[in-house]
Image (cartoon, grey):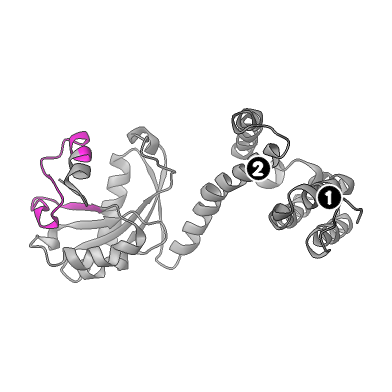
Amino acid sequence: GVVSKTREHAEALGRKVEARIYSSDINDLPTATRLLVLCVPDSALEQLADRLRRVAHPWRQTVVLHTSGALPARVLQPLADQGARVLSFHPLQALTPRSDASALDGVYAGIEGDPPAVAAGVELAANLGMRYLVLSAEAKPRYHLAASVASNYLVTLHAVVQQILQSLDIDRETAQAVMAPLVRGTLDNLDASTPEDALTGAIVRGDLDTVRQHGLALRRHLPSLVPVYASLAMETITLAVRSGRLDPDKAEAMLDLVNKMVTLPLPAQSTAY
């Protein structure tokens, strides 16, 4: 069965999954349901759990899971109080309305909850062709932080790259075509090695002049991006030192240079620093 805000949405998904029931009324939840999946915004979970506990349902025979990456299973406590086994089951994948079931093949799910619910989550992951990580409630925010940085911020970085190229009058489609092979190659390198070994570029080479030119170009043409570049550069310098390929003394000089990018007043035109 599928229950959604509108019958149209419920019916659209219900037909895809061959559901017997699709409705906009929460009381139409099929009584035969033993696995209830809550796919709603994080902010709606607690209220939804409170509404569901008032529905006549064999909760003691039901596993209820939500798909939030950040929130623990205990956000469903109103249902746990009714005897339900509660679980958080977060597919570690970027899903869009165009995604199909194959998008989950081999993907990890972050699983957290009480032991019987975790066992059900492991079984669900196996049935979906997924892998799994069993997490504690305390670990969930950091787990989701890592996922957000890996996925969301990668998209943001790509937008920053396009902004830089657009300042050269390179359109979005061309920018995508230009950078896509480089991004794919970098991801391939990461698959085959560690970040320390996969790192390339001016910072790990200790090329102060190139980093200086980056800073001058940003300060002159795209000053709003200076803090973004500086923050990433500082983390990259740390990574480069950890790799053993950047001398600590040169790293100190590079950190000083990057700090000046942010702290010196923005010039009316390009100046040296």
Compared to residue 234, the image places residue 106 above or below, namely: above
Residue that badge 2 annotates: 163
Which quadrant holds the C terminus?
A: bottom right
Q: Is residue 130 magenta?
A: no
Residue in view at x 34 percent, y 53 percent: 67
Which sits earlier in the primary sequence, circle 1 or circle 2? 2
**Mark 2, secondary structure of its residue:** helix
* Whether residue 229 is visible: no
- In percent of width and height, residue 22 lies at 14, 44
Magenta span covers which residues? 12-37
How far is the residue under mark 1 from the one under mark 2? 16 Å
- In percent of width and height, residue 128 lies at 31, 39
Left or right: where does residue 239 sit relative to residue 255?
left
Left or right: where does residue 270 sit relative to residue 53?
right
Residue that badge 1 annotates: 216
At label 2, the amino acid type is Gln
Residue in view at x 18 percent, y 35 percent: 15
